[in-house]
């Protein structure tokens, strides 16, 4: 049968259009395949950054810096004496630890729990008495090591009686709603550092008391 020329031309044009369309789709597909990896989700990154402080508790936790070396995320990267030195709430404690020569002892220890008095806790001690203690290395060392026990203890493990590095003991009572260490209140607890768990307290603990 004799073919209609116009119909043949139309079929050829339609086929060419389809082939061009498929080729274009293939090109676009290649471009999509070669795109660079998607950037990390900023929401996920922010969540991960908050993990260091996720299990802390206590009314004093909001006073911990929100960023920088003295924040929860900063302290978790450093051993305990270094971490404390970056926290503005603990500068008097750091001065005492330095005078006692305990920085390396604490930083190099393998797993500690530290009950860390704030600057306000030290301020409760009469100035003359505090100066005398800071000048007496043996007495200062006894007081500071009375604040340290072995093991990185979480809020459940820390409750009870514990031997200190001063070879005496402390008693922790309560829970994350109201925790005390020999009468001193925990104002921010379960703070992680590279080698220790820190419980910030509002009173300096004295051996034998």
Image (cartoon, grey):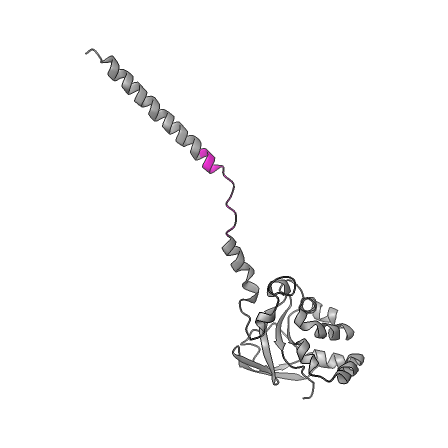
In the orientation shown, which residue stands out farthest toward the right? 135
Left or right placement of residue 25 versus residue 135 in this view: left
Picture quadrant of residue 200:
bottom right
Q: Is residue 24 magenta?
A: no
Camera-side residue: 118 or 173?
A: 118
Q: Which image quadrant: the C terminus?
A: bottom right
Residue 197: % across, % down: 61, 71
The residue range painted magenta reads 30-41
Left or right placement of residue 111 versus residue 179 in this view: right
Residue 147: % across, % down: 67, 79
Left or right placement of residue 7 versus residue 137 in this view: left
**Residue for point 74% across, 73% down:** 95
Q: Is residue 35 magenta?
A: yes
**Residue for point 59% across, 81% down:** 185
Residue 150: % across, % down: 64, 75
Magenta residues, dominant SS class: loop
Picture quadrant of residue 100:
bottom right
Residue 17: % across, % down: 34, 24
In the orientation shown, which residue stands out farthest toward the bottom? 209
**Residue for point 67% across, 69% down:** 88
Picture quadrant of residue 80:
bottom right
Q: Is residue 147 visible?
A: no
In the orientation shown, which residue stands out farthest toward the top? 2
């Amino acid at each position: 049968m004799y073919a209609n020329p116009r119909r043949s031309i139309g079929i050829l044009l339609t086929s060419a259009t389809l082939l061009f369309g498929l080729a274009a789709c293939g090109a676009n597909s290649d471009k999509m395949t070669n795109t660079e990896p998607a950037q990390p989700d900023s929401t996920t990154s922010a969540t991960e950054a908050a993990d260091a402080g996720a299990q802390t508790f206590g009314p004093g936790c909001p006073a911990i810096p929100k960023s920088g070396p003295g924040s929860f995320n900063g302290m978790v990267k450093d051993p305990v004496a270094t971490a404390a030195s970056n926290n503005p709430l603990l500068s008097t404690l750091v001065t005492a630890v330095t005078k006692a020569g305990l920085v390396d002892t604490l930083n190099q220890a393998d797993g500690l729990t530290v009950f860390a008095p704030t600057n306000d806790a030290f301020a409760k001690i009469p100035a003359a008495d505090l100066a005398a203690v800071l000048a007496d290395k043996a007495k200062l060392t006894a007081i500071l090591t009375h604040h340290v026990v072995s093991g990185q203890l979480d809020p459940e493990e820390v409750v009870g009686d514990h031997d200190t590095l001063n070879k005496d003991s402390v008693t922790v009572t309560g829970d994350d709603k109201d925790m005390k260490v020999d009468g001193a209140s925990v104002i921010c607890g379960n703070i992680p550092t590279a080698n220790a768990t820190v419980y910030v307290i509002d009173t300096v603990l004295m051996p034998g008391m």
